[in-house]
Image: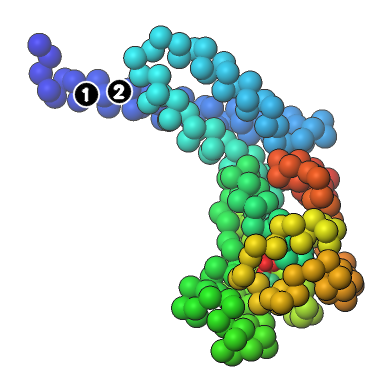
């Protein structure tokens, strides 16, 4: 029987091999990034990740530690993706658009896809103020809420590589548009008034739509804000009839093309 110190010594040697293997793997990831950039290929290729997963599954067939090793690999892959995403997006990604355009849903998926941190502006305001958006509107009025929004955006200006899901009215102030453009790219998500109504009809957390849950009102307000959204947008992606994956792939392709 080996004594405990010897076993620990062997574990330490395993760790050394893991560290150098990981460093080597990361280096190869950087080579892949370089190659793809040189040949104008998309940096993130979810289908390749899927293939890798299948290969790993096959390699681990029958292993006693299959689940544990798969878990570790999920972190390795996440970190490779982070490395790749970092090479693509140095700035923040701001998702803007009318209520119900899919900003929250898309931000969750996109941040996972790119391994970037995610921020939900409305959530930050709710936390800071200690009350719901509806209560802020009711007690202090819309102007106060818009100030909260602008202040929150200002606080984000020093941060990078975030996916930020903005409130639908963020584009109403020029200073907000300027601040978003200073630290990132603005992605406008759109949906028809009909799709929008479908998505928001059961929500009672949107004071602006309270008692206005109909296509006419939504279409009217969208039209009023259209110019503001267009002014903010670097990239426009329609979401009607698309899956969240399709929307995210379009965003990544458009942002990559922009450089
Ligand atoms: C608003 C949109 C809401 C929220 C507030 C005001 C707007 O965010 O910020 O109710 O003026 O369009 P969502 O677009 O995330 O619903």
Q: Residue at x 21, y 23 (%)?
A: 9
| Mark 1: few/some/many CA within 10 Å (<14, 14-19, 20+) | few
- Horizontal side of residue 143 vs 256, given as left or right: left
Residue 123 image point, x, y percent: 55, 68
Image marks 2 and 1: residues in contact by CB distance under 8 Å = yes
Please tell me in which quadrant of the rendered image residue 249 appears. Answer: top right
Position in image of residue 192 (x %, y %): 85, 58
* Left or right of 63, for residue 179: right
Residue for badge 2: 13
What SS does tag 2 mark?
helix
Give the image quadrant in which the ligand numbered 1 is located.
Answer: bottom right
Q: Is residue 99 above or below residue 258?
A: below
Q: Quadrant of residue 158?
A: bottom right
Q: Position of residue 8 (x, y in %)?
A: 20, 25
Tell me which residue sits at (57%, 83%) in the image. 136
Q: Sort mark 2 into few (<14), some (14-19) or many (20+) by Cα contacts within 10 Å.
A: few
Camera-side residue: 258 or 10? Answer: 258
Q: Which residue occupies the foreground of this view, 126 or 134?
A: 134
Residue at screen point 75% across, 75% down = 212
- Distance from disc 2 to disc 1, alpha carbons, whole Å, reads 6 Å
Report if residue 101 is visible in the image: no
Q: Position of residue 199 (x, y in %)?
A: 71, 57
Q: Which residue is mark 1?
A: 9
- Tell me the tag on residue 79: none
- Disc 1 element: helix
């Amino acid at each position: 029987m080996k004594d405990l110190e010897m076993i620990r010594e062997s574990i330490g040697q395993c760790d050394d091999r893991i560290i150098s293997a990981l460093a080597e793997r990361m280096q190869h990831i950087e080579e892949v990034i370089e190659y793809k950039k040189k040949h104008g290929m998309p940096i993130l290729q979810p289908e390749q990740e899927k293939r890798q997963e299948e290969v790993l599954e096959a390699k681990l067939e029958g292993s006693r530690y299959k689940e544990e090793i798969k878990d570790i690999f999920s972190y390795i892959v996440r970190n490779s993706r982070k490395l790749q995403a970092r090479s693509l997006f140095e700035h923040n990604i701001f998702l803007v658009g009318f209520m119900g355009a899919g900003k929250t849903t898309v931000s969750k998926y996109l941040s996972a896809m790119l391994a970037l941190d995610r921020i939900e502006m409305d959530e930050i305001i709710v936390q800071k103020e200690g009350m719901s958006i509806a209560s802020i509107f009711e007690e202090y009025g819309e102007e106060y809420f818009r100030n909260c929004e602008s202040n929150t955006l200002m606080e984000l200006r020093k941060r990078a590589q975030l996916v930020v899901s903005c409130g639908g009215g963020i584009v109403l102030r020029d200073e907000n548009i300027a601040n978003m453009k200073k630290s990132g790219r603005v992605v406008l998500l759109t949906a028809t008034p009909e799709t929008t109504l479908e998505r928001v009809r059961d929500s009672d957390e949107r004071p602006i739509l309270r008692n206005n849950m109909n296509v006419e009102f939504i279409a009217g307000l969208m039209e009023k804000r259209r110019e503001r959204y267009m002014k903010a947008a670097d990239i426009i992606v329609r979401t009607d009839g698309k899956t969240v994956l399709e929307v995210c792939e379009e965003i990544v392709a458009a942002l990559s093309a922009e450089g």
